Amino acid sequence: MQKDKGFRRRVITLISVTLVTAAVVAVYLAYGVHSRSNLPLIVPKDANWFYHFQSRSVDEAARKSADSRPLYYDSFYYTLVKLPVLHNVKDAGQPGIYLMTDVVLFADEKGWYAALTVTSEEKLNAFCRDNVPADLIEAPVNKEEFTYVKSKTRNLYFAYKHKACVFYIPSDTAADVAFAEQALREVFTRKDSSIYNVAALQELYDRDCQIVFWQKSTGHGVQLSGDYAQFYYTDSARNKQPVSPLYLFSKAGLKYGEADVERMLDKNNRIKSREYLNQTFRAMFYFLKPFVK
């Protein structure tokens, strides 16, 4: 009888531990999946422009607003895996980077940047060491603030630290390694002067905008959970005429004829969320083109 009681106590204890562990994991996953992205922390406040595409949130919105994903959804993934260092990726989770979570693009006086979220710095170290052809990149260089590798074929750098990785192209084609290291050091250490701390941008994130764009102290966000894309503007942009729903895409390089505009926009100048997503996935190729060509 005593043995039976001891066995039952162990079973109850084991069940309790399992339930507590499951609860902790559930809270962790909920926080990791639904919490606001911290990736914009790497963007300096004086950036010339900033574009944040929250692809996981966008994907969730797409599933709610349409029976299937937008036509160009898969092309977005295939564009990402063309980025240097990500060659030979067989699975989205292989390199230790979230390929379908967030993409942050920005530019400042030192160059152009494309940033993704890192899930495992250890896996990313191993991937850069073991999976990328030696003729594409040089050996990783470890700095106190970040680790980076340089392309062997062009003036392009890939740097990472903790939860963020950045592809970087210097604005000066003759820039040396010291110039690039200083630019990357500022990206990874200037969180106190990050664009993320701008109150006007926080308003857009508070509205759960899946896409946020900022340029010269003005910005707008796009909410895609409904049938039609909903646009929100910062205070500095509200007094100006609202931008066309096709503004960002035209800025990226997409061309639209009169027939295209009539097909995509209704008489109230609205665009369906699914169509906006479709054009977004097309535009991402143009935004990322400097890093993959």
Image (cartoon, grey):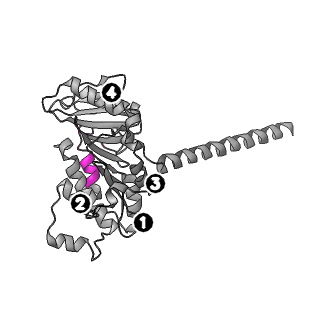
When the figure is inspected, residue 256 is found, relative to residue 142, above or below; the finding is below
Residue found 23% across the figure and 60% down from its top: 247
Q: Which residue is mark 1?
A: 64
Residue annotated with mark 3: 206
Question: Magenta region, mostly helix, strand or loop?
Answer: loop
Question: Residues under labels 4 and 3: Cα distance?
Answer: 33 Å
Element under disc 2: helix
Q: Report whether 7 appears left or right of 50.
A: right
Cα separation, mark 2 vs mark 3, equals 22 Å
> Please, what is the three-letter code of the amino acid marked with disc 4?
Thr
* Residue 247 image label: 2
Residue at left offset 19%, top offset 47%: 289
**Mark 2 vs 1: CB contact within 8 A:** no
Task: Provide the residue designation for mark 4.
Answer: 147
Which range is magenta?
Answer: 75-91
Which amino acid type is shown beneath numbered disc 2? Answer: Tyr
Going from N to C along the chain, the mark reached first, 2 or 4, is 4
- Can residue 127 be seen here? no
Residue at (33% x, 54% y) in the render: 236
- Of mark 4 and mark 3, the one earlier in the sequence is 4
Q: Earlier in the sequence, mark 2 or mark 1?
A: 1
